[in-house]
Image (spheres, rainbow, N blue to C red):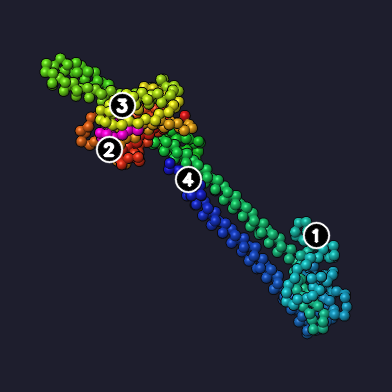
Amino acid sequence: MHTIGKFRQSSSFIVGLFFSTLLMVGVFFVLYFVVMAGENALLKESKDAINSEITLLQKTFEHVGFEALEDSIREKTKDPENAYFYALKPEVSSLLIGNVPNWPEVFSEPQKGEFVFFDIAHELLDSNTKSIRIGSEHYDIMAIIRTLPNGSELLVGRNIDDIEIALWVAGTFGWLMILILFLVSALSIALGYYVVIRFNRIAESTDRIIASGNLSERLPVESSWDDLSKLSIVLNKMLDELEEMLNSIKSVSDNIAHDLRTPLARLRQDIEAFAQPEKRELLLGEVDNILSIFSGLLRIADIESEKQKSAFEVRDIGVIANDVVEMYTPVAEEKSIQVDSNIAEAQVYSDRDLLFQCFGNLIHNAIKFTPHKGKITVSLTQDGNKTVFSICDTGIGVSDENKERVTSRFFRVDKSRASSGNGLGLAMVAAVVKLHEAELVLSDNEMSDSGLCCQITFLQ
């Protein structure tokens, strides 16, 4: 069966996985640059501003003095436009100068040149400015501390609430993109799985139609909006045309066989009145051969039209197989052919006359192509819901390339056509097997150097 065995081996899954992986890598790169690189860029600007401000205050101390530094800090903290936080802690006093209410605990052991982060509660400041973050009760401060030559400590910081909210928005957006990516990937995989399932159904139906030759079966159409259903509709239209063409061809051949049988029967009657016995018998033999061909064609057409199921019932086909073996054993003995049978009881929904003719054709062919002192084995076994009828011979066998063709009408293994027969025996067998919804398999006889095994499997 030409279906996709595993979803992970399908092109839909591979292509979907490739693009999902590509998109995922792209999103992670974007997220990294937005969160990591963006954070560094945003904080760098604030760090540079803080460094410039604290350097300016240090120079004020160096050139003007400590009191001028105190005055400068007091003036800056009074400016409503000022965005900095200041704290000056003299070495000999615990009193702070600036707008930071308490010396942050993180600075109990100052680390020169390193920025640290702390927060200040809103109620500890005189400013009416609140954090731009919804629900926040404090300012987030990034600051640096430097020790002055007189032992005092100088802190300059800046509110980074705006940076925090920007980073939060960027991070949230990034995670949202990842979530969307996973949803898209899951949807792509689900869609790919749906496509594979639909393709497998179409492939299974197509294989079944090809294997059975039943052109009346159609591909499933599950909707009218998707492309696969449109493909099934187009293929079903093609099957309609093929079925109509084949039916017309079969109708022509069946009509020819039916119409010619009557004048041939009249010709036979005229030949019977022929004066010379030798020529009469020769002509009668040829006419009988032609009549048997037309009768075989009409019989196959009748079976293929499925008009024979009125006689179907559950019966023991072991009785039919025994009757066939009993009938053909004398014929086999004329060629010193040994016929062994191992036939069990098996209840199968079937037509007795059709199976008798089917089994008879198989054993007749086996006798015809098995040489003197050969052997034919007939068996009927039942295993669970399977019933298997097989005939194996030690004859000339059939090549692998011909095994698929021997059930065609008029096909002859003997290209010289020196042997008797019209090439319709196995075609009729195939028609009966198909009517019984069974399976016919031709294989080499593994128990002999040559020969053929014909196996029919009936499903309960």
Q: Amino acid at mark 1?
A: Glu
Q: CA distance from mark 4 to mark 1?
A: 61 Å
Label at residue 5: 4
Of callouts 2 and 4, the N-terminal one: 4
> Which numbered mark, 2 or 4, is in the foreground of this view?
2
Question: x, y (%) of residue 419?
Answer: 22, 32
Q: Which label was assigned to residue 137?
A: 1
Of residues 283 and 187, the one drawn nearer to the viewer in this rendering: 283
Dot 4 falls on a residue whose secondary structure is: loop
Distance between mark 4 and mark 3 Cα atoms: 48 Å
Q: Earlier in the sequence, mark 2 or mark 1?
A: 1
C-beta proximity under 8 Å, tags 4 and 1: no
Which one is earlier in the sequence, the residue at label 4 or at label 3? 4
CA–CA distance between discs 3 and 1? 106 Å
Residue 369 sits inside the magenta stretch: yes
The amino acid marked with disc number 3 is: Thr
Q: How many marks?
A: 4
Query: Closer to the camera: disc 2 or disc 1?
Result: 2
- Does residue 285 show up? yes
- Kindly identify which residue carries mark 3: 329
Badge 2 element: loop
Q: Which mark is residue 396?
A: 2
Label whose residue precedes the other's in the sequence (2 or 3) = 3
Foreground label between 4 and 3? 3
Specify the amino acid type for callout 2.
Ile
Closest to the observer, 240 or 355: 355
